[in-house]
Amino acid sequence: MALFIARYGGRYKLILLLLTSAPFLTGEILRVTALQQILGPIGLINMALGTFGFDQINALMYSSTATAIGLVYLWVPFMVLAIYLSLLNFDFDLLEVAKVNGARPLRAFFEITWPLNRAGTAIGLVLVFIPTLASSVTSQFLGGPDGALYGNILAHQFGATGTWAFGSAMGVVLFAISVLVLAGVWKAVGDLRRSGVTAPGGGSI
């Protein structure tokens, strides 16, 4: 999505970005509730299936699938924005050079576009990883018992069960995992900046 906006958006780039970020004009609970009306037993998808004579898909709601769909819907604009910003300074003429030299589009993507924009992807991962790791609202509304996330189980220890010691231990594990992931991403971005990529003409990207 970010690649399409950066390369083909033209004068409509800003409008396309605003459309991507439009869901953030409403609250998180309202957006999750809207997904319930789409994925639920009497939601938009199942109603459409029933209209055409197909059976309902009960697995769409109160499952890990529903939780995954909700998380992607809620946080994909952060990833799109981070990758788009990294593509602003990308020279798309490099892809034309690769095409002239016989590279297919998929190979040009993995050998040119992806290596030169990995830093933006890493930053997007950080922006998305932290809120999804501790997310509880999405799985509570969409996942049900089968779609509970770490954040739900952690909150449960301090609420219903009252096992604060176990909840504290889970909190320490959550913090340690977050630090390790952030350190790994930071190191990866630092290595990319230090190594650089040699561009045509001898410059460094």
Image (cartoon, grey):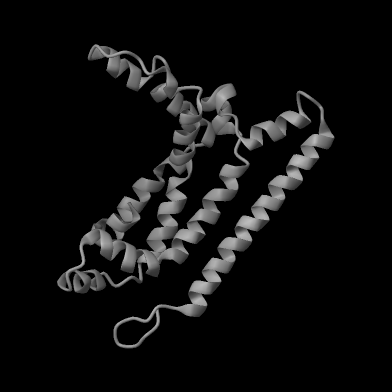
From this view, report whether residue 173 is shown above or below residue 183.
above
Please tell me which residue is depicted at 56% across the width and 43% down the height of the picture: 132
Say which residue appears at 34% left-offset and 88% top-offset: 202
Q: Residue furthest right?
A: 165
Q: Residue at point 51% right, 29% down?
A: 64
Image check: 135 left or right of 58?
right
Please provide percent x and percent y for residue 115.
Answer: 39, 67
Q: Which quarter of the rendered picture does the C terminus lie within?
A: bottom left
Q: How many marks?
A: 0
Image quadrant assignment for residue 196: bottom left
Q: Is residue 25 visible?
A: no
Q: Is residue 170 visible in the rendered structure shown here?
A: yes
The residue shown at (15%, 72%) is 100
Give the left or right position of residue 85, taking residue 32 as reference: left
Q: Position of residue 151 (x, y in %)?
A: 65, 37
- Is residue 202 depicted above or below 69 in this figure? below
The relative height of residue 189 versus residue 146 in the rendered view (above or below) is below
Q: Position of residue 17 (x, y in %)?
A: 35, 52
- Between 77 and 149, the one nearer to me in the picture: 149
Q: Closest to the observer: 6 or 161? A: 161
Describe residue 183's horizontal placement relative to residue 109 as left or right.
right
95 or 37: nearer the eye? 95
Residue 75 horizontal/vertical position (percent): 48, 45
